[in-house]
Amino acid sequence: MSAGAPYDVERLIAEARRLAAEYRRATGRPLAGVSGEIAEHDAARLLDLELCSERPGGWDAIGRGRRAGKRIQIKARAIFDERKSGQRIGQLKLDKEWDSVVLVLFDENFEPFEIWEAERPDVEEAVAASRGARARRGALSVARFKRIGRLVWTREEGEIEDEIWEHPGR
């Protein structure tokens, strides 16, 4: 089988999940950069996105199917303790072109359990309303992202295809 075959990528992602979880358990810290790679793989597979081999701007993937043509940033956050508040997602590229942000939430084994999506105008409004240095850098808390976004995939239900939705935080 060639190096680029899907089977090899699936096996490598499974190994990356295992290593990231073991590293976190051993050190108490995340293995830098790994969750983002796993999130991109999972978002593409679960939401029918095409990852960009070249990163043309502020997006990581282009939507297919119901998201056809949409330019999407992909973010990740592993949730080890749901009681902890203030967990943040990585910096959003507000100065680049993109249409929405997908946030993949992982459990302690770096397996996805929820994926949320927020549209650009809602993200920009939330960042503008935030205070402090983190907000100026385009960072949002996971809780705030959930308030402005919508749940688009769960481990139990798969992709959620509700076309009409209302912002729960408004």
Image (tube, grey):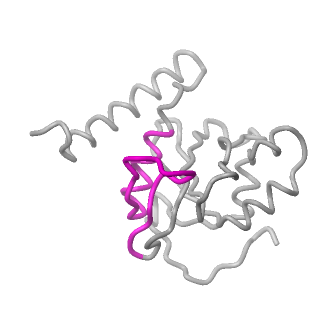
At 39% across and 74% down in the image, what residue appears?
65
Residue 45 in magenta stretch: yes
Query: If the image is split into quadrants, where does the C terminus sit?
Result: bottom right
Q: Residue furthest left?
A: 1
Q: In the image, residue 80 lies at what x, y percent?
A: 61, 36
At 46% across and 57% down in the image, what residue appears?
155
Q: Is residue 22 above or below residue 123?
A: above
Q: Is residue 35 above or below residue 39?
A: above
Q: Is residue 48 left or right of residue 34?
A: left
Q: In the image, residue 131 lies at what x, y percent?
A: 90, 47
Magenta region, residue range: 36-65
At 65% across and 49% down in the image, what residue appears?
93
Q: Residue furthest bottom?
A: 164
Q: Nearer the viewer, residue 90 or 96?
A: 96
Query: If the image is split into quadrants, where does the N terminus sit?
Result: top left
Residue 79 in magenta stretch: no
Q: Is residue 3 left or right of residue 95?
A: left
> Which quarter of the picture shows residue 88?
top right
Q: Is residue 113 above or below residue 47?
A: above
Q: Nearer the viewer, residue 93 or 40?
A: 93
